[in-house]
Every structure is written in structure tokens, then in C-alpha cells.
Amino acid sequence: MVKTAVRPPARRSSKRLPHKNASGIIPRFVVQAVKADAEVERFKTSAAARRFLSRILEENGWAKVVVASDAARFLPKTRGIESLEPADPAVCARADAGLVAAGFGIAATGTLVHLDTGDRDRIAWTLPPVCLCFLRAGSIVPELEDIVDRMAGHLRRGQKPGFAQVSLVTGPSRTADIEAELTLGVHGPGRLIILLYGP
Amino acid sequence: MGLDMNRRIDPHLKRVLQTFSRNWEAKRAAAFQGLDFEDLREHLAEVRDEALDDLEGLLERFEANARRRGSVVLRAATGAEANALVRDILRDHGGRVLVKTKTMVSEETGLNRFLSKAGMRPRETDLGEWIVQLAGAAPTHMVMPAIHLTREGVARIFREALGQEVDPAIPALVQTARRELRREIFEARVGLTGANALIAENGSVMLVTNEGNGRLVTTVPPVHVVLASIDKVVGTMREALLLLKVLTRNATGQPISSYVSFLAGPHREKQYIILLDNHRRDALKDDRFREMLRCIKCSACLNVCPVYQVVGGERFAHVYMGGIGSLLTAWIHGLERSRPLADLCLVCHRCEEVCATKIGIADLVRSLRERLVSKRGAEVWKDAVFNRLMGRQDMFQTAARIGRFLRPGLARKDGSARPLPFPLKKYDRFRSLPAPARRSFTKLFERSSGREAPETKTKEVVLFTGCLVEHFYPEVGLAAVKVLRRMGYRVRPAPARCCGFPSANAGFGSAARKIFSELVPLLTGDSPVITLCPTCTIMLGRLGPELLGTDKAGRFGGRVIAFSQFLKTQRLKVLTRLKRSRPLQPSITYHDSCHHGFVLKAGGDSREILQTVLGIRIKEMDRPEACCGFAGSYAVSYPEVSEALLGDKLEAIKTTGADVVALDCPGCLLQIRGGCLKAGLKVEVRHTAELLAERLAG
């Protein structure tokens, strides 16, 4: 099937992906995520990832960035970046990119897992055309079943009025509804860039 | 009744659906690599059954947990009630626009139509559903509703419905959809989704999408409405993950979809969860049909359905599509509405191979037909043939004798029947029908026995030839006798009677029971009962005994075995006696009959027998297991579907360049030989028994 992205992709990082983890779940995660059309960039430290982020924002002219609450610490202190809070959907829809962080990665399917208590962070994940996601390599587990108790616990938390959500995100938004031809970026982002950092 | 008789097949739609199915098959196989599908679906079937067993308890727990989080849980007994609830919610929140993700339940209740009449604007956000909504058309496929449209067609729809000129290129079309739908989503105050699962242990809702519209619809508008049927409830997170594991792989061949969300509680202003019954509790009380409630709406069954791929979802659906659709429709929308679907089903059993929860769809469709006949009556001609005529076996045999008597006027030189007169032309437009044989198999066997040496063999087999061999293809029966005798068996033909399957399949349960119960005493003994037709095999071996439900019939059923499968048990010395040194000249391809391949699972046996004994390699055709379109009276009820399937089969045979098509079913023999004759295709069609017998000297 021919794949067509809604926006043309920018120049990718030329770093090779190191295979440090002996068990191989990190390479497995990377392979699966790429299969699902995500882009994965690998870094030794979060600082290196943040430097890359600075560069990629500048190179693409992504000046307006919606920042999820748990990703604020990853925002580079660069001039020219307007960081938006994920509040007004209409405003955030006009942003260039969303900056988010995932709680876990699932190696078997290249999936990002985020556990929310508020619903606003989803705006950062979903509305802008590009999603930049920080993921600590140490938080990757082999299978979804490995964190089922964490997921269930999060949803059960408090047993009082409130909102809880577990989201599993694998690759960018996609459809093959027209002529069974795959297109990325229909409702959600057309690009999902995973910044995988740490040992 | 014969409403669809003159419907035409859309070749473009057929091509699109068949291509989609092939791609899906490959993706699905890759997605299940390293996993045991049989094991997974066995487990999932258990999980679904347990949930159905404890439905009320689970629903109560779900409700309690959802309420604790602040969700409003509402119960709707009927579709109309559910629709009214949604309308009231829209009114309460001062909204006119409702944005929706794809949910079959809302189609089941006719929500869109209802809301539009009430002056509201329901808007689909799933791309395919939205396109189809703009076009005012019905969806063609459960997962890919607009798959039948070309990009130019979509551009045209956008031009007419949106007043926008869009470049008929897919990226531009998708970009337009993204823009338009976001506008709607931002305007809406209420978003409605279905649920792929309702998780009782925490009151959360699982949503599975690829496009991300589920996320938008549950993030942007401040109010979220969940419309879900009660059978969606599962106990735990673990069970939901098991369902997820099978669902995405089976539905689209993806290890996981792009977005899976577990939502608990109101994300902003309010969350309403409407639990819809709509006759599901009634279905649950029915011991026979409750199995269908295991369905997780993956639509894998559609992707293997030969009929669906020919006619599409507009025809093979009321709301729910396919064989499973007929079952759900019978309960949700009423027995009468399920009839066209139940009739369109081939009962070929393919769907059962891929069903995520092991629902015995084919047998259930047959049971549904029985219910339809007993509660609503049957078509006059079907009643005449399958009930009144076949129910009286003596009358049936007399009719056959009359047919033989009239043969000189009916037959052409090549053994085929003269073309049918107008207005019956459509029934043999695409295949020549056979004329009755000059003499029945029974008669020919009696005559030949006189010339045989006195029987010294001690081992006996009973040969049940079935109606088609008895009256039309006695040479197949004689060939089987020759082979069996050469293997050292004494052959006793069963009395020439129908097995009862045509009556059972058409829904005439009492006629089938009568025919079968009359047959059982005639087949007493210990000898194996060898059959030449896989349909007879199923009827004698399983279906008949099930209909009668007696122990004796069950024991008798254990003796029944198909010809090729019997030969497979006779290895070593007995088989090599059949081997000849003369090499076989013609190239042979093999056609897997639906019953022989999917129910008896004997395709491998037949190939092995042919290859071993004849010393050849089968030249495989493309999709040898594709249905030829015979399916008994199906070819009479739906000649256009039968013709389309036969056309594909003949094409596949032609492409192999083989001289001979081997098969194990007289019904397929009739269809394929008749098709070859009509198409001028110079290919011999032979039953396995004939090919083996031809190799024996004398």
C-alpha cells in the first residue's frame, strides 16, 4: 500500500540507534514503533534529547507548541518558542506541535502509554499535526499485560468523583477508508516523533 | 421471496471487496504470528460466556463504579428509548450538533435519522462513515464503510455536499475531511461514542480507533455520551486486554490500533453512559441462540464470506452484516427482517474458521431458517420440494423415475439437459444442467453384480451415494465400487434415499427429521458407511443425529466416513495395490468443496490420495477453496451470486491450464462441469473416485 503523509516529513536525525539493553526490549520497541509509522530518535540522556528537540523545533519553524503538564520539564529554554497550555482546543488546534511525555512503552507493539487524571493533556497529544513524545527507555516493558495492574489501579483510583484515563498510542493517526490506501494524519497528528532517552 | 432474483452484481464492488479481503488475510496472518489464535479465541469465548452468565451482576458493578466516578448511567430497554435519551441530553446541554464516532449500536437504533427529524445535527466523524453520510448512502463494510468509492467519487460527494472543489487525490481529500470535521467537533457541545468494552471492575469504557476521532470527540466537546449494548460488559481489565488482543488483529490485521483509550468518569461537564438492551436479554434466555451474543463486532467473518464479497454490505445487511448479521437482526429487528440475510448465507462455514469467539454461525443460520419456516412459513416452491416431496421418499423416488423416463426429451448427446425455456432461462444461463442418467446407480449396481464372481470377501462397507450420484452421476458410484472391491471390500449399496440435508438446510426441520429417522434403521450394522458427497457425510454423521438427539443415531453416525478419508485410513499394502506403472498424462487441479474442506477438513486427504495413487503433483489453482456457487438450491434462489462465484472459479481453473479438475462433491461437479460446458472450457471434471477407478485395469 502507498503511504501518504498529510504534511511532508522534515529531515531526520542521522544518529544510529544503540542497542544497549541486553534483553532486547528496547530494540523491539523501536522496530514495532517504526512499523506503526512513528519516528524514533534515541538519546543517552534527556538533556541530549532536549537539545535535539530545540533543533528540530527551529529547523521546522515549529514556533507554537502545546505542552502537556507532565512534559513541561522537557521544554527547551529557547527563544522563539511560544508554549501553550492545553486549554482552549481551538487555540491549540492552531499550534505547530504538541510536546508530551509517556509513562510507559510497550515493546511488543511499539505503544506509548499515558495515564491521565485531567483531560487537558490529551489536547497536546491529539490536536496539533505533530506529536513530540518523551519516553524514558527504562519504562519500556515487554507486553501490555505487564502493566495491567498499573492501568487497572489508575482507573480505580480514589473511587471518588473525578476523571481517569489510560491511553495507548501507537504511531500517528491513520485511515485507509478511501480506496484502502493508507493515509497518516486524519484526526490526530500525522507525525509522531518519539524521543527515547536514558539507558 | 424472490425479491433479489434480478439483482445485478457490481463487478467493481466485487473486485474491491475481494482485493481487500486478500490483503486483510495476509495482514491478519502476520499479526497472529507467534500467537496461538485457536487458544486465544477459545479463551475469549470462555470470557464472553462467563460475562453473559453473570450479566446482571456485572452490569450492576459497572454501574456502581461508574456512578462513583460521577458518570450518569442510564438504562434503555429499546432503541427508541435510547434515541430519546440522547435527544434529551442534547437539549439539556443546549446543543444541536452531536459528533459521533463509529458505533453500530447507534445505527441499530436509527439514531441519526431520529435526531435529524428532531431538528438536530448528528455528524459522523469516522472518515468512511462521514463520506457515506454526506452521500446519503448505506455503508458497504463494517470497518471500511466507503471502500466501494473511488477517490473521484469522494471528490464528487464533497463537491455536492460541501460545495467545495477538491483535488481528487487522497491526501487532499483527507485534509479536507480533517478540516471540515474539526469544525464540527469544535462546534459541538456533545460527543457520542460506542464502547468496545465496558469494564465492570472500574466502571471504565474501552474505545478502539485508528483515526483519533475517538480522542477528539471525547476531549473537545464538554459532554461525553457512551451508547453501548449490555453485552459489551466484561469483568476485569485483563479480560478487556484479551479482547483487545484478538479484536484488532482479527478486524484489521493490526497488532494494536493507533488509539486505545480507557475512559473513567466525566472528562469535563458530564459523562452519560446509556446501556441498551434491545432484545439482548431475550436472546440470552434462548439456549440455542445466546452464543451469538459473544460477538465482538470484529467483522472478520465478512472478510472471508464469499457472498459478502460479491454483493457487499448494502445488500447483505439490515444493519448488521453477513451470517452473524442475520442472527443479530432476528432478535434486534425481528424475525422477518432477518429472512433475506438468512437466505443469502451460503452456510459454507468459512466464517467459523476466523470468528474471534468461536460462534457456530453456519449451524445457527440453519437453526434460524428452521425458526423462520416454522413461525413465518416458507416460499411455496421450497415447501413443495423440500417439505412435501422430499418428506415422502417414495414420492421422491417416483419423481426421479419419471425424470429418467422423460430423459430422451430432456437430454442432449453430451449428457447435459436441453436449455431451459423462458422464463427459467436465468437458471441455466451460466451453467448447463445435467439430464437424469439413463439408469440409476442402484439399477446399474444390480446389473453389474450379476457378472461379478461370488463374494468371498469378508470385510463389508456400505456405500451411501446420495441423490446426485444415484440419479445423475451413477458412474461415480460405480467407480467407487470398483475401487473398494479392488481394495478387498464387499460393497453393499445403501437403499437409494435422500439423506435429508436439503430439507434441513432449507429450514424444514420436521421433514428432515422424518427423512433421517426413516433412514437410520436401513443403515444398521457395524460396517463403515462410505459417502461420496461431503454434504451427506455431514448430515449422516452429525446433523441428522443432532436433529434426532438419540443415542442410537449417534452411534450410527460414528460409522460414517467420506470416500477420500476412508482411503486415507487404508494405507500401505491396500493402497499400493491401486498403483499402476502407467504414467498419467493429463494435468490435474483440485477444487476444495466448502463442506469437504471447511467442515470435514479433508482437502489434504484428497490431495494426498490423488498424488500418491496416481503418482502426480496437483497443479494448484488460485484459491482452490473458493466456493463454486452451487450450494444446492442457492443457485436457484440467487443465480446472480452463484454465477459470479462460478465465474471466478472457472477463471482460476482456466489459468492453471489443467486438463482435469478433481473434486469430492457431486454438487460442485454439477456446477463446475455445467459451467465449463457453458463457457466452452475444455476441462474434464471428475470425482476422486472416478480418477482412481480409471487407473485400474479391467
Image (tube, coloured by chain):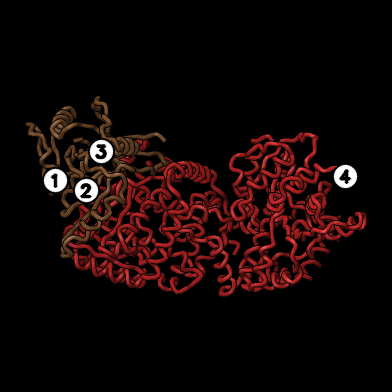
Alpha-carbon neighbours of circle 3 within 10 Å: few (<14), some, or many (≥20)? Answer: many
Examine the rendered structure and indicate whether residue B275 appears above or below residue B419. Answer: below
- Helix, strand or loop at disc 4? loop
User: Which sits earlier in the primary sequence, circle 1 or circle 2?
Assistant: 1
Q: Which amino acid, mark 2?
A: His
Residue tagged 4: B698
Which chain does the residue under circle 1 lie in?
A: A
Examine the rendered structure and indicate whether residue A26 appears above or below residue B309. Answer: above
Q: Colour of chain A?
A: brown
Residue tagged 1: A70
Alpha-carbon neighbours of circle 4 within 10 Å: few (<14), some, or many (≥20)? Answer: few
Q: Are marks 2 and 3 on the same chain?
A: yes
Alpha-carbon neighbours of circle 2 within 10 Å: few (<14), some, or many (≥20)? Answer: many
User: Which sits earlier in the primary sequence, circle 3 or circle 1?
Assistant: 1
Q: Position of residue A190 (x, y in %)?
A: 27, 38
Alpha-carbon neighbours of circle 1 within 10 Å: few (<14), some, or many (≥20)? Answer: some
| Cα separation between marks 2 and 4 | 77 Å
Q: Position of residue B3 (x, y in %)?
A: 58, 61
Select label 3 or label 1 by which is in front. Answer: 1
| Cα separation between marks 3 and 1 | 17 Å
Label disc, if present, on residue A114 of the rendered structure: 2
Select label 2 or label 4 by which is in front. Answer: 4
- The chain drawn in red is B
Residue tagged 3: A192
Q: Which amino acid, mark 1?
A: Asp
Q: Are marks 3 and 1 on the same chain?
A: yes
- Helix, strand or loop at disc 2? strand
| Quadrant in the picture for residue B504 | bottom right
- Helix, strand or loop at disc 3? strand
* Residue with the most extreme top position: A14
Q: Are marks 3 and 4 on the same chain?
A: no
Q: Which amino acid, mark 3?
A: Leu
